[in-house]
Image: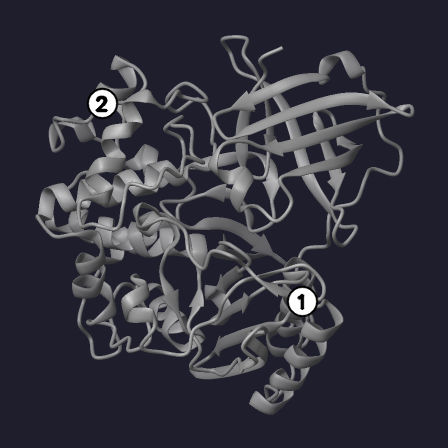
């Protein structure tokens, strides 16, 4: 850590930096929230909707995407505190109608598996089960036909479907729909006035919409299906998200002393459950909801989110009482995150953000036969091939995701990083992301890319 400044920069400073960096990275609009040692800073820049020329403001609601998972996990751990759920007993005990890919998975999967993304349920499954209050129940019924992508507990693979199932399990034990449960257990006790899960409620406020392309064009679909609620449909402001973060910084209690989560559950959520097969932008291990990492020797927790044309980033450094959240609605949001968070951590707390991944300067020899082939799960087909003396990864969305993604197919040149691990160059900003190849004890082979484990099929 470097020496930190005596007086943190003010709101005007970070508004100016957000505005300049959003323009540099072609981001139409953005919202920034900083909590640092008792002080909250909010900033906004650009347009919430470029088509309608609606300004982004600090009270704009953004889609926080998969940061929603930490909220769902928090509510689930509250039910664990109350004894309505347990972490390690099979979920079928409280949801006897549950049917998954096979009998062993059905009879053995636990809440801990779902929270830590180790269930093996193929995660990127987004059927539209309607807008009714039974959408999660209908979604859970479809999981019986969804193949598993890895054996239960064998590795980690990011699992949206598992969090939708958590939402249904919570409905089952409380008799309350997930949307209402989140209002009752989190939004209202935390005093959140600008947080919602349903479009009807979001439309009472100024709301951001997603954009694709340059110049930015408003996306054709504003939101994903209601059944994705527990995994990614919360809309909120930077101030409300920081209020939620403070619940975890303050050991599970609200500002007025109301306890929503036990200290044991707060700590459990921040305790590593599984190491990631490949480095991940937010960290190297998963807790119960949170992604766990380290910046400059300090523990971090956080999460990212991505919806249709919107991106969200959240990092918390509890040892220096720093939390940063960023929402963006298009452009090169990842580059904006990297540059802005690096500045904030350094200028406010004297903390250095980890350096970006780069290929090894003297990489070890790689036998292409060890990694080339086809890897596939329900929503993705990955081909690793030789081209022009190197390796290329071709990543193609299939099914519903193919119609929602800005870029349904992407090709990434691969460069060795370490034995079994490569980095792939992103086509948007030239940065590098990790790709790991590994073999389970049963001999099955996988590629780990984008947080997902995809089995080799040929």
**Residue drawn 24% across the image and 50% down it:** 77
**Which element is circle 2 on?**
loop
Residue closer to the observer: 199 or 79: 199
Give the quadrant of residue 364. top right
In this rendering, the answer to whether 259 lies above or below 109 is below
In this rendering, the answer to whether 377 lies above or below 41 is above
x, y percentage for residue 117?
40, 36
Label 1 – label 2 distance at C-alpha: 45 Å
Q: Can see residue 66?
A: yes
Residue named by callout 1? 342
Give the quadrant of residue 456. top right
How busy is the neighbourhood of tag 1: few (under 14 within 10 Å), some, or many (20 plus)? some
Residue closer to the observer: 274 or 450: 450
Q: Is residue 166 left or right of residue 412?
A: left
Residue closer to the observer: 75 or 95: 95
First in sequence: mark 1 or mark 2?
2
For the C terminus, the image quarter is top right
For the N terminus, the image quarter is bottom right
Q: Is residue 290 left or right of residue 186?
A: right
Q: Is residue 160 left or right of residue 281?
A: left
**Residue drawn 57% across the image and 80% down it:** 53
Give the quadrant of residue 68. bottom left
**Residue drawn 49% across the image and 49% down it:** 292
x, y percentage for residue 434?
67, 38
**Which element is circle 1 on?**
helix
x, y percentage for residue 256?
21, 79
Residue closer to the observer: 73 or 102: 102
Residue named by callout 2? 99
**Residue drawn 55% across the image and 8% down it:** 443
Residue 77 numbered mark, or none = none
């Amino acid at each position: 850590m470097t020496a930190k400044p005596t007086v943190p920069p003010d709101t005007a400073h970070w508004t100016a930096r957000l505005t300049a960096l959003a323009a540099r990275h072609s981001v139409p609009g953005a919202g920034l929230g900083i909590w640092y040692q008792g002080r909250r800073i909010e900033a906004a820049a650009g347009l919430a909707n470029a088509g309608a020329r609606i300004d982004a403001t600090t009270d704009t609601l953004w889609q926080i995407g998969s940061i929603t998972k930490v909220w769902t996990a928090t509510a689930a751990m509250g039910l664990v505190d109350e004894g309505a759920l347990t972490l390690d007993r099979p979920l079928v005990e409280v949801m006897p109608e549950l049917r998954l890919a096979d009998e062993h998975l059905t009879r053995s999967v636990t809440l801990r598996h779902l929270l830590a993304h180790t269930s093996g349920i193929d995660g990127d499954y987004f059927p539209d089960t309607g807008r009714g209050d039974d959408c999660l129940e209908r979604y859970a019924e479809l999981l019986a036909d969804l193949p598993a992508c890895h054996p239960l507990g064998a590795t980690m693979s990011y699992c949206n479907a598992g969090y939708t199932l958590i939402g249904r399990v919570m409905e089952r034990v409380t008799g309350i729909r997930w949307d209402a449960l989140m209002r009752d257990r989190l939004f209202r006790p935390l005093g959140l006035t600008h947080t919602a899960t349903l479009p009807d409620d979001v439309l009472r406020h100024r709301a951001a919409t997603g954009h694709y392309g340059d110049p930015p064009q408003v996306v054709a679909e504003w939101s994903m299906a209601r059944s994705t609620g527990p995994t990614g449909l919360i809309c909120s402001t930077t101030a409300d998200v920081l209020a939620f973060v403070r619940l975890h910084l303050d050991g599970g209690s609200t500002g007025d002393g109301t306890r929503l989560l036990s200290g044991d559950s707060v700590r459990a959520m921040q305790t590593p459950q599984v190491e990631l097969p490949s480095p991940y932008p937010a960290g190297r291990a998963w807790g119960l909801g949170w992604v766990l990492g380290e910046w400059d020797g300090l523990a971090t927790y956080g999460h990212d989110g991505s919806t249709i044309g919107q991106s969200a980033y959240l990092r918390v450094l509890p040892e220096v009482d720093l939390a940063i959240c960023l929402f963006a609605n298009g452009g090169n949001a990842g580059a904006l995150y990297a540059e802005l968070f690096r500045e904030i951590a350094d200028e406010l707390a004297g903390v250095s953000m980890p350096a970006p991944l780069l290929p090894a300067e003297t990489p070890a020899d790689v036998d292409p036969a060890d990694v080339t082939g086809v890897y596939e799960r329900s929503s993705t087909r990955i081909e690793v091939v030789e081209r022009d003396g190197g390796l290329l990864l071709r990543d193609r969305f299939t099914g519903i995701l193919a119609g929602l993604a800005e870029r349904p197919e992407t090709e990434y040149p691969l460069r060795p990083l370490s034995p079994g691990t490569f980095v792939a160059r992103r086509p948007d900003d030239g940065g590098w992301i990790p790709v790991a190849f590994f073999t389970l004890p049963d001999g099955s082979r996988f590629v780990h890319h984008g947080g997902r484990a995809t089995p080799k099929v040929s």
